Amino acid sequence: MNRVFQPLPLGQRIPASEHAVSCSLPAMADVHGYERKDPNTTRHLTSGYPRFVVNPLSRQLAAHLAERESSLRGKSLWLTSSARMASALVAHLGPAEANAFLHAGVNGVALRGDDTDAASRAKLFLQHLGGFISSREAEDALVRFGARKQIDPEESFAGDAAAEIRRVLLPALPGAAASDLFLANSGMNAVYGAFRALSEIQAARGRTRWIQLGWLYLDTIALLKKFTPTPSDYVPILDVFDLGALEKLFAAEGTRIAGVISEVPTNPLIQTPDVGRLAALCRQHGVRLVLDPSMSSVLNLNVLPHADVVVGSLTKYTASEGNVIAGFAAVNPSGPDAGELRRRLPASLEPVYSRDLAALAAQIGRTSSVLERIHASVPQVVEFLRRHPGVKDVFWTGHPASRENYGRIARHERAVGAMISFTVRGSLEKFYDRLRLPKGPSFGMKTTLICPFMYLAHYDLTSTSEGRAELNRLGLDPDLLRLSVGIEPADEVIGALAEALD
């Protein structure tokens, strides 16, 4: 019997591209090994999500530079997306520990080879801000230096790639002009750029506090924790539906609050706040609102009229092959700080490398057809999971807790996005290890993809009894699985799930 889904070996790229944004982690033992950096696991990894796993092309380029340039020999090299990012990393680490360099067009920072603490801090900084060199830029440099024969052929847009990307995105951003839409080298860099620009604007008004509304993606949480001026300037309200708590906070301290960041819907519980009420509260108190619709795609949701800035990952849905990392930030032209944001955002956003732009532009025109196929399958998969006795909880955009909130901003009733989170009764390991679906990080690809999200995002909490108790207290099951439905037939996805659940 021919089946769409066959088990993938540990470390296989998903998709089969050197620029793949995911890789196969087929067993829970592999997930543990990946998080613990066990050499028995990591030696099999040929790729990973680009902000977490340095692409092999980038590692090869760093090794080549260290051999080619005597001043870099013996150093730990961190290649960056720009000279500006290299300078920011040096400022973060301290000039006594790090030195920026530019060698034959490649930017980076050199650390002492034995300084593992500085290397760890450098990696986290570039991860949070989206500051790593593009794998395609690394590939081009290797060819230029003669360390690689040629660029691997791939689909590429022949015209003005940035214009093509804007052509597809702007209709999803009503009222916005091309001058309101900024491209970034990753979704996280877009989040950082909006956060930084608004922080600068609001700080001049004495507003420095930032509100995290809902349990958000780990790097968004990290940005708020690490880059607000003081620990008290980071205020998490983890219940996305508790706008009463937000209202009380605004009433008491509204003049000190710079902004609110929320995802619509959130990652990984797929919860949507009452965006209209949230926006009205922010406007009433002079608080700026940043919304991130990455979980369902900005092409599915009409959020710009409610926000000051909409940010998102273009790696998801629009780069549906799963081999491009990019993001965007869109300014609401009716917002009170629109002009200042247009001026400040370019200073905070990292440019998208030209070949990444061309690869994204070649795929983005297919987004609507990809979404149509995903939307046809998701309700069927949800219904199967909801009815199966081996499944405990199922979360998606149509969950009763926030279905109405989501429906108010959805472009049409079928625009449900790809994401389903669920938990199983009994052993997570048994289910996960038996499952034939591709298993790895990321979502919004043509390929169906599943991962034990809390283990990949918050392993420190899932690996201790205290951490697991804390997650449970917050309503987050440590064994939550995050499923991104692709364009394969729904009955194939359901069949693979049924087989593992039996």
Image (cartoon, rainbow, N blue to C red):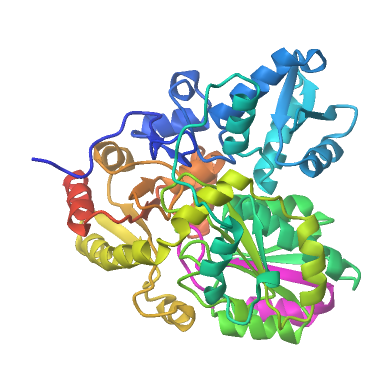
Residue for point 84% across, 72% down: 256
Q: Is residue 158 left or right of residue 59?
A: left
| Magenta-colored span | 245-273
Seen as rendered, the residue at the extreme front is: 159
Write the residue at 64% across / 77% down.
176
Q: Residue at x 23, y 65 (%)?
A: 380
Name the side, left or right, on which 203 lies relative to 147.
Answer: right
Where is the N terminus found, in terms of image quarters?
top left
150 in the magenta segment: no
Q: Nearer the viewer, residue 335 or 362?
A: 362
Asked if residue 475 shows in the view, the reply is yes
Residue 500 picture location, percent across and down: 21, 44
Where does the image place residue 16, in percent across and percent down from the top left?
38, 36
The answer to if 247 sits in the magenta stretch is yes
Residue in the picture at 37% in, 54% down: 484
Question: Does residue 239 appear left or right of residue 279 in this picture?
Answer: left
- Number of numbered callouts drawn: 0
Foreground residue among 344 and 459: 344
Image position, residue 41 (x, y; %): 44, 24
Name, please, the residue furthest toward the left.
1
* Residue 315 can be seen in this image: no
The quadrant holding residue 394 is bottom left
Relative depth, front residue between 118 and 109: 109
